[in-house]
Structures are given as C-alpha cells and as structure tokens.
Image: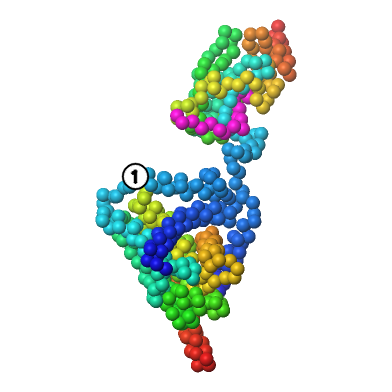
Amino acid sequence: MSELGTMVFGLVLILAAVGGAALVTWFERRLLGIWQDRYGPNRLGPFGVLQVAADMIKLLTKHDWVPPFSDKMVFIFAPTAIVVAMLLGFTVVPFGPDLYVIDLNIGLLFFLSMTSLAVYSVLLAGLASNNKYALLGGLRSAAQMVSYEVFMGLSLMGVVMLSGSFSLLDIVEAQRDQWFCIPQFLGLYVFLIAGVAESHRLPFDLPEAEHELTAGFHTEYGGMKFAMFMLGEYLGLILISCMIVTLFFGGWLGPWLPPLLWFCIKVFIVICFFILLRAAIPRPRYDQLMSLGWKYMLPLALFNLVVTAVIALAMQGQG
Amino acid sequence: MFKSLTSQLQTMWTILQHTFTKAETVQYPEEMPYLAPRYRGRIVLTNDPDGDERCVACNLCAVACPVDCIALQQGVRDDGRWYPQFFRINFSRCIMCGMCEEACPTNAIQLTPDFEMCEYDRQSMVYEKEHLQIKGTGKYHDYNFYRVAGLAIAGKDKGEAQNESKPIDIKDLLQ
C-alpha cells in the first residue's frame, strides 16, 4: 500500500475500532440479556442500538472532575494510555492479505508489548487516585498482569515455532492447510485465559471487582475519563479477539467469502464467546487467580512449548 | 482441576441453551402486568350502597397503620352520625400493607389494584379526603355499617337494624 493509502486505512481502522468498541458495549448488554432471560437495552432506535449514542451523550456532558487530592497529571494521563496502547496494538493485525497498517517482522512481540503497556494505565490510575479502593485495584492488576503476561507470551511461542515467524502475515499464511487451533489447542486454551485476564474482563476483572472494590482502579473516574477506560477495555476485548482469530483460527483465510468478511465473522464469534464467559463464570478469589496462573497455566504453557519444539524438530529432521 | 473445568464447561453450555428461552421481562408501560383482584395498591374511601360515606372516623385505621401515614379528625353530624372532618393519607409513607383495611369496621377504607401514582412533587403524594373518596362501594356491595350496627341514629332506632331483634327491657321483672 502507498503511504497515503496506509494513512487513510489507519484512520478508517481507528474509527472502526472505536465505533466497534462502542457497539460491543451495546451488543454485550443485549447478549447478556438474552442469556439471562431478559431483554437488555431495547428502547432507543432499532433493537436499542442508539443506547450507545445515549451513553455517549451522557458521558460526554458529565462534569469532567479531577479530585483535588489526586496526582493530577498522572490522573489525566492514565485513561489515555490504555486507549493509545490498545489502538497501537491494532496496527499489526492483518485484516486481509493487503489490509494492514504495518507488517512488522516482530508483529507478535509488538502486540504483546502494547497489551503490557496497558497495565501502566491501570496501575497509574490506581496510584494517582489516592484512594484505598483504587490502590487495591491497581495492586491486584499489577500482580495479575505480571503473572498472566508470563505465559501469555509463552503460549504463543508454539505458534511462532510452527510458522517460523513473528510476523502476523506469515503466521496467517502458515495456516493455509491447517488452523493452529488444532495442533496448538493447549496454546489456544492458555492464551484465551491469559487474554481474558489481560483485558481484565469478567471472570478475571479483579482490578475492578465492583462487589469488593466499588470500582477498583477507576473508582475516582467519571465522565469522559471513565469512558476512556471503558473504551480501552472494549478495544482490548476486540484486539484479543482479533489476535485469537489471527493466531489460531486462520485470520482472513476461508473459502468463498471475501477475506475481510471472514475475519469479521470469526472475530464476532470469538467476541460472543468472551461474552458467554462473562455470563457463565463467576469471578475467582484473588489467591485462586494466582494459583491458577502459576500452578496450572504456566506449566501447561511450558509443556506445550516443549512438546511443540520436539515435534517441530522431529518433523524438521524427517523433512 | 479437570473437575472444575468440566463443571465450568457445563455452566457455559447451560447458559448457551438460554439463547432459546423466552425473556421473563414484562415490558411494563406497553404490556401491563397481571394484578390480582386483591392486589394491595392505592387506598380509597368507599360509600355505602345508599351513597353516604362509610367512614365513621373511628381512628382504628390510623392506629393500625404501622407507618402512621393516616391522619383524620372525627366530627359529629346533626343526626349523631360520626364522620371524618378531614382524612389524609401520606402515600409517600404508605407501605400498602392493608392493615387499615383489616382494621376498618365499616369497610370504608379499601386497597385497590392500582399502583401507578408517581408524582414529581413530593407534596402531591399527600391525598386528602376528596382525592380518596370514591362514589362506589368497592369490594363490598351491600354492606352498610349503620344498618347492621346496634347504634341509634336519626331514622333508625335501636333494634331496627338488620338481623337485630328489639331490645329486651331487662328491668321488666322488677315491675
């Protein structure tokens, strides 16, 4: 793509991602409603879609309050960080054979680093708020992210080994014959759980945990800054779904339909799955979260890594 | 680990099956919920079959009321019949428990299956007698307190009430 084309595509991508995130907030509520035998927001516009606009108007017109006891600079910076990090993560996602902002040869690492950067947002928000609940939320989030980051990266190394590249385009191309969800099902399982924890969505929303910490790290946030956190969270959800599709379900690959459509369908299904997780599974206790991460997920990721390496080497020896 | 995993998968499957169950929600303003005939909602004061007010201002409802939301003042008509000079129910306090209805000896105070009484002004929740009084008899069509009560009022002497015999002069043995 030309430079201008890339810029235009980047702009379209930002708009689509933000719009998509806004739409997912509505879609999630509708879907949760269906699964909980109720309707969800269905009043405004067709199927209640305009609920998004109503929420937006409400959040935008709210008093943009900065608590006097907070660390003001950091307090304002924190919510922007998560949105920027998540949007940057979208740059490496290949939406089709030619539809991407940039094809980095370390695309996967770039994605991992961007999701890790999002931790700073939560952490700084918790610190800057100067509030017990926010601090607890920040603490939890730091520990959770650090422990889940470890095997999130490790779980993807099997994919890298099989495709022989960190570039997401190459990884998708390597799945022409077989999607990686079959040979790398353990990797998929670990990455899925790490992904939920990374985007701190239910059931791993311990940094927020409304029932214990009022609202965790964003207790002191309201109006537009709160909206930024929510935007970041939903962008994270979409980004993780995009990555799962790219890494394990063949990205844009698929017969008959155009590549972009295939990609969108797959991402949609994964998002539905994430919402199902939220509807079905209760939040674990904090120590359960930690023990799940270190005692089960990390060994599982390592096991997957070793077995994949052995098989890959054996196949290389034959071929 | 595996036990909890299968249990969680089972939960997810159960939730997924709920895609095909109907929502329990009653979409209220468009779709009215069913209210039983004995539903306890807005309180009214009823008239007896003759069209006279039933309430005799005995204050039993105000005594029975657990939240003290009923206030009334007893007055006496020329014919000796009691009536409330004012009758006031503060519906912002009322808990629709129906104790007043049970306490009422004349079936004057009754609860109706109407709950739509939202107001913008809190003061509008205080209902006076003219707001409470209805023309009809409510749930009890034929009941008239003074026609069954032994009390004498103008136009009805003692012993003339329904199911009542003439009073016995207990001193007639002395004559």
As drawn, is A267 to the left or to the right of B167?
left
Residue situated in front as seen by the camera: B25 or B169: B25
Residue hosting label 1: A63
Residue at point 56%, 23% (across, down): B132
The amino acid type of the residue labelled 1 equals His
Label 1 lies in what chain?
A
Quadrant location, the N terminus of chain A: bottom left
Q: How many labels does the image show?
A: 1
Residue stretch rendered in magenta on the structure? B105-121
Residue B142, position as x, y percentages in the image: 70, 21
What residue is at 39 percent from the left and 67 percent from the top?
A: A2
**Residue A139, percent from left and from top:** 34, 64
Q: Can residue B47 be seen in this view?
A: yes
Q: Which residue lies furthest to the bottom in this view?
A: A317
- Which residue is at a point 58% across and 38% down the rendered structure image? B29
Is residue B118 found inside the magenta-colored segment of the image? yes
For residue A126, what is the image quadrant? bottom left
Q: Residues within 10 Å of mark 1 (few under 14, many from 20)?
A: few
Query: Which residue is located at x 46 percent, y 74 percent?
Result: A169
Q: Position of residue A47 (x, y in %)?
A: 56, 48
- Identify the main secondary structure in magenta: loop
Residue in front for this viewpoint, B146 or A31? A31
Q: Is residue A115 visible?
A: no
